Image (tube, rainbow, N blue to C red):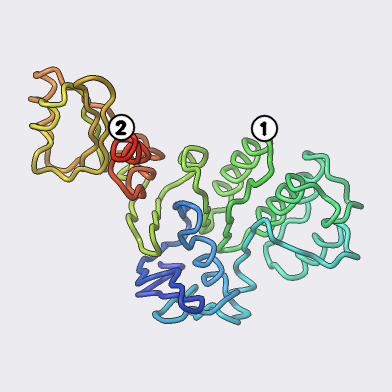
Amino acid sequence: MNVIECQNLVKNYGRKQVLEDLSFNVTENKITGLIGRNGVGKTTLLKIIAGFIRETDGEIKVFSQKPFNSLFVSANSVMIDDHMTFPPSFNLADILKEAEQFYENFNIELARDLLNYFSLSNHLNHDKLSKGMKSTFNMILGLSSRCALTIYDEPTTGMDAAVRKDFYRALLKDYLAHPRSILLSSHHLQEIEDLLEDVLLIHEGKVKLHLSISDFKEWAIGLQGKKSAVSRWTDGQQVIYEKEIGPGLLYTVIRNEGIEGMLHEARQEGIDVIPVSANDLCIYLTDRQKGGIDDVFNRNHSL
């Protein structure tokens, strides 16, 4: 069953087009990573999914309903980001009590245990918390809601490394015990890739790739060796990224499709065949130029 169905989605702010002809489906009970660089439209897309804003064109359905102003979608989804605000008269305990009234599956005991674990007092006010503490409380709220669709938009902003690690572990443990559809947005794939089942990579307002995390990790391969040899073996291939790594040496990333025999022969000629990490692949696929920042210096500042 598809929890989210998105077809030819467009979102404009005035003359600026943020999302362009975006199409994808998200099936139920999966953790999907929404990946992309800052400013590519991730937050806009998540707000449309959550029903906070309306699309300009195209069609989107969440739980088979249009999400904008849908009480059903609101009652069965929660979006967590670092811009959440609450009534200033409410302390953290008050916020959790209200959430328990609204969300059918809200687990108040889990929320209280997590507050205690992260040393957050019930009597604190949300707007008085530090940035990291706000993110921690927001995470607790989202996790305890146990909504059929839980959306996290850059949820670890301000958290230190230890708290981020605890958050990811808590998310995975509760997901395994209570499966639901989770959208986790980040531009740091290396931190979350062990949690993910699918990766949805968007770039310049469009879907670049939508694959399982295992397929994503094998989508490309790197070749490293003498420039003449690497260039010969990559001729005619889909080159994603390349850079010179030393005098006469070249590192090239190509699409890993139908090249198994080629790779064996390349190794025999002394070319190193190197796996490409999921995070590096995201960077290479969203670079404007195949050599990244090196191209700037190679083109304009070589003297």
Q: Which residue is mark 2?
A: 302
- Give the residue displayed 32% in from the left and 47% down from the top: 285
Locate residue 295: give its quadrant: top left
Q: Is residue 109 above or below residue 106?
A: above
Circle nearer the N terminus (1, 2): 1
Q: Which residue is mark 1?
A: 162
Q: Nearer the viewer, residue 79 or 173?
A: 79
Distance CA(mark 1)–CA(mark 2)? 43 Å
Locate residue 59: give its quadrant: bottom left
Q: Nearer the viewer, residue 179 or 172?
A: 172
**Lateral position of residue 150 relative to residue 116, left or right:** left
**Lateral position of residue 13 relative to residue 274, left or right:** right
Q: Is residue 70 above or below residue 83?
A: below
Locate residue 158: give its quadrant: top right
- Give the residue displayed 39% in from the left and 54% down from the top: 201
Q: Is residue 138 above or below residue 206?
A: above
- Crowding at dot 2, Cα within 10 Å, few <14 / some 14-19 / many 20+, comes out as few
- Residue 55: x and y in percent read 48, 78
Q: Quadrant of the C terminus?
A: top left
Nearer to us: label 1 or label 2: 2
Q: Quadrant of the N terminus?
A: bottom left
Mark 1: secondary structure: helix
Q: Amino acid at mark 2?
A: Ser
- Crowding at dot 1, Cα within 10 Å, few <14 / some 14-19 / many 20+, comes out as few
Q: Amino acid at mark 1?
A: Ala
**Lateral position of residue 218 relative to residue 145, left or right:** left
Q: Is residue 90 above or below residue 295?
A: below
- Residue 114: x and y in percent read 76, 44
- Residue 98: x and y in percent read 80, 67
Mark 2: secondary structure: loop
**Lateral position of residue 248 relative to residue 48, left or right:** left
